[in-house]
């Protein structure tokens, strides 16, 4: 099993920055990749950024150049650094872990960007 704990959401004005955190525990060695998705009310959930166990990263086109995802020294923590935030970034952000045991989700954290 894998458990994910998220933190770091909040309210920020346009152009500001937030750093989210996702800590994985449990069967962490079953994880192939970790990342973040977001979902605005009434809209489909979309990938924001992901990082594999080998360190490869993937970003949505809409956040490239603004968001950076990295992992902690234990490789079971991921940190999306979100810069130059826009109102359209407002959403519930959820940590995701994908691996041999399945696909796991955190509870979600709200990010609100004011204009």
Image: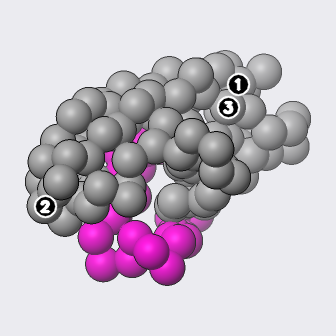
Marks 3/2: CA distance? 28 Å
Residue 10 image point, x, y percent: 26, 31
Residue 59 image point, x, y percent: 50, 71
The answer to which image quadrant residue 99 occupies is top right
Residue that numbered label 1 is attached to: 2
Residue that numbered label 2 is attached to: 15
> Which comes sooner in the sequence, label 3 or label 2?
2
Up-down relation of residue 5 to residue 87 (above or below): above
- Which element type, helix, strand or loop, lies under badge 2? loop
| Label 1 vs label 3, nearer the camera | 3
Q: Which mark is residue 105?
A: 3
x 44%, y 29%: residue? 109
x 40%, y 70%: residue? 63
- Which element type, helix, strand or loop, lies under badge 3? strand
The answer to which image quadrant residue 25 occupies is top right
> Are circles 3 and 2 on residues that touch, CB within 8 Å?
no
Q: Quadrant of the C terminus?
A: bottom left
The answer to which image quadrant residue 86 occupies is bottom left
Up-down relation of residue 15 to residue 11 (above or below): below
Marks 1/3: CA distance? 9 Å
């Amino acid at each position: 099993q894998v458990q994910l704990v998220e933190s770091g959401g909040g309210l920020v004005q346009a152009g500001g920055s937030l750093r989210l955190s996702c800590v994985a525990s449990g069967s962490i060695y079953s994880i192939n990749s970790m990342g973040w998705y977001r979902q605005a009310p009434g809209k489909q959930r979309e990938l924001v950024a992901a990082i594999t166990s080998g360190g490869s990263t993937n970003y949505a086109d809409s956040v490239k150049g603004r968001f950076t995802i990295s992992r902690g020294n234990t490789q079971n923590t991921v940190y999306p650094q979100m810069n130059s935030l826009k109102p359209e970034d407002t959403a519930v952000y959820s940590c995701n872990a994908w691996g041999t045991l399945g696909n796991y989700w955190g509870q979600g954290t709200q990010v609100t960007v004011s204009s």
